[in-house]
Image (tube, rainbow, N blue to C red):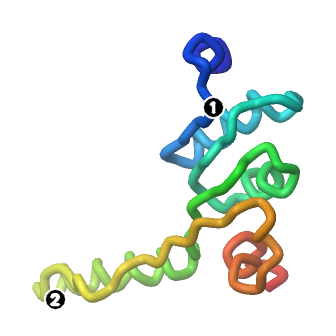
Amino acid sequence: MRKMAEEMGAEQIIALDSKATLMAAEEYALSADHPQIYGVGSSGEITSYLEKGVLTAVAAWSKYAAGYLAVEYAAAAIQGRGDPSDSALKISIIKGDEIYEPENQKLLFPVIS
C-alpha cells in the first residue's frame, strides 16, 4: 500500500471498511510524513490511531444502535412487514480534534460514556 501511494503521489487515502482503516493506520503509524488517512470504524485501535493523529477522520456509528436496528429489521421481516425504511443508522464523521466532544465520546468510548 505504501509503495503504491508513494508511486501515485497520494495526498489522501480513503479506507472503506474498518479492516482497511487499521491496515492503513498500522502502515503509517511510525511515519511522521504520510498522506491524510480517512477511514471507517470506532474500535479501540482505530480510536487510538485517530487520537494520535495517524488517522485524519473516521466515519463512526453506535454499535448499540446498529444492533437495535438489526433486530428491528429481522422482526419486520419475520412479521412480513417488509423494510422499516424510516429507520436509518446515524453515521458521524469524526476528525481527530473532535474525539473528546460529548457526542463523539459516546461513539468512540462507549464503556466510559
**Residue nearest the observer in this picture, 81 or 35:** 35
Q: Residue at x 66, y 42 (%)?
A: 37
Q: Tell me if 73 is positioned left or right of 89 in this view.
A: left
Give residue 96's position: percent from left, percent from top. 77, 60
Q: In the rendered image of this protein, does residue 2 appear above or below residue 81?
A: above
Q: In the rendered image of this protein, does residue 84 appear above or below residue 92?
A: below
* Badge 1 element: loop
Q: Which residue is mark 2?
A: 79
Give residue 24's position: percent from left, percent from top. 67, 34
Separation of residues labelled 2 and 1 (CA atoms): 49 Å
**Which amino acid type corresponds to the residue marked 2 in the rendered image?**
Gln
* Image quadrant in which you'd find residue 78: bottom left
| Circle 2 crowding by C-alpha within 10 Å: few under 14, some 14–19, many from 20 | few
Q: In the rendered image of this protein, does residue 97 appear above or below residue 46?
A: below
Q: In the rendered image of this protein, does residue 81 appear above or below residue 6?
A: below
| Circle 1 crowding by C-alpha within 10 Å: few under 14, some 14–19, many from 20 | few
Count of numbered circles in the view: 2
* Image quadrant in which you'd find residue 7: top right
**Which amino acid type corresponds to the residue marked 1 in the rendered image?**
Glu
Give residue 100's position: percent from left, percent from top. 82, 75
Q: Residue at x 73, y 38 (%)?
A: 25
| Picture quarter with the N terminus | top right
* Badge 2 element: loop
Q: Which residue is mark 1?
A: 11
| Picture quarter with the C terminus | bottom right
Q: Nearer the viewer, mark 2 or mark 1?
A: 1
* Image quadrant in which you'd find residue 30: top right
